[in-house]
Amino acid sequence: MKKKALALLLGVCMVTMTACGSKAPEAASGTPAQEADGAAGGEQEAEAPADGDGAAAGEAVAGVVWYNFADTFISNARQTLINIGAADGTITITDADSTNDVSTQTSNMNNFFTQGVDYLVLNNINTGAISEICDQILDEGCYGIFANTDTPTDEDFAKNDKLYSVSSVATQSGTIMGEALAEYWKAHPEADRNGNGKLDYVMLLGIQGHYDTTVRSQYSVQALEDAGIEVNNIGGEIICDYSRATAQEKVAALLANYSDDIDAVIACNDDMALGAIEALKAGGFFAGEDSYLPVCGVDATVNGCQAIKDGTLLVTAMNNPVTLAKAIYKVMYLTNNGEEVTTETIGLEGVSVDGHRVWLDYSPVTIENVDQATYDINDTAF
Ligand code: GAL
């Protein structure tokens, strides 16, 4: 651990662990731990790593900058990472909330640089400035791990041996939604509600320009077209910042004009899918068999899985926050021990390593397998 980091460690940890402990998602073993409406849910104290006198004292310090603590998927990944760090004790996890704001992200990063962290983990929202951020990390001399976001370029990686990315393969999640929707469309001729021969879909996007949402929207539509289905977009690109409330509001507004035309909703995460379902219910959908409308999502959150069981959500793609947290921690653990990061050394199911890029696979979740779509944020084995 750097001296600067050691000096500041106590204060940082006190602040961070208090914040972490105050709002941690509730976790039942073997069950995804999530909360309604994307807000942090049940109370659960996160244990701070202790060294006998109450101070966190791992061998290295990580400053983790998440884009938004209130995001359902992120809150689960965040809590798992805290849990793993607390259980293992090698890497001390401190974190900060960018509240979906680029300037807050920048000041969070700068604070961690000032503190002299050994690892800067960035769930980046400033997608236009990746190379600049990589250069800054290089100047600071710490490790940089881009998490659940666009990966740096080959050139960025070539400049810095201490640069990594850990992310899921976003293309898969789009394809999973598109293929499930294509299958439904082909099996249900009545799904063409206005009889125009086209699948009229609404596309709900996350943060503008965010890699996952861009790729998910492209690949879902591509899968429909690859299945020979003619598609028609209703409403354009509807930016909802991954938020359930925003999606609900925007779909409700759209229904005023297009209620008879919409054949499906493709949402780039489950929270937005759930918001859409609420709006659709208020608009008279899901009232009986003849008012069903296929809605697709990504993440397999607890509420997303519940919606599949309820018969409202058609499909979601398992985006496992526990695997994400484990992969991030393992990269730090291995590099801190001077070990190479490979698919074998990472040793996590569905995770593969290509150079300094660590990739996580998605898998489809439907009514067929929803009961197996589980993870446990208290699982600290990495
Ligand atoms: C995505 C996830 C979204 C949101 C986003 C933030 O992978 O599906 O729900 O959490 O990451 O980076």
Image (cartoon, rainbow, N blue to C red):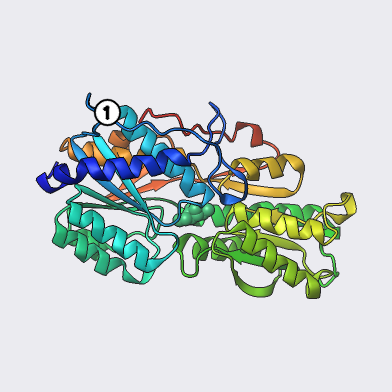
**Is residue 226 visible to the viewer in this orientation of the structure?**
no
Report x, y in % for residue 172. 52, 52
**Quadrant holding the N terminus:** top left
User: Left of 129 or right of it: where is 314?
Assistant: right
The tally of labels here is 1
Ligand 1 lies under 8 Å from the Cβ of mark 1: no
For image coordinates 33% across by 33% down, the residue present is 48
Residue 252 occupies which quadrant of the picture?
A: bottom right
- The amino acid sitting under disc 1 is Ala
Q: Nearer the viewer, residue 345 or 123?
A: 123
Residue 41 occupies which quadrant of the picture?
A: top right
> SS at mark 1?
loop
How many neighbours does mark 1 have within 10 angstroms: few (below 14), some (14-19), or many (20 or more)? some
For image coordinates 31% across by 58% down, the residue present is 108
**Is residue 305 visible to the viewer in this orientation of the structure?**
yes
Residue 113 occupies which quadrant of the picture?
A: bottom left
Q: In the rendered view, would you say 172 is above or below 338?
A: below
Q: Nearer the viewer, residue 342 or 271?
A: 271
Report x, y in % for residue 42. 55, 37
Q: In the rendered view, would you say 152 is above or below 316?
A: below
**Quadrant holding the C terminus:** top left
Q: Which residue is mark 1?
A: 50
For image coordinates 38% across by 60% down, the residue present is 150
Q: Nearer the viewer, residue 320 or 231?
A: 320
Report x, y in % for residue 263. 77, 64
Report x, y in % for residue 241. 54, 63
User: Left of 309 or right of it: where is 350?
Assistant: left
User: Left of 130 or right of it: where is 238?
Assistant: right
User: Left of 185 or right of it: where is 121?
Assistant: left
- Residue at the far top in the pictured view: 52
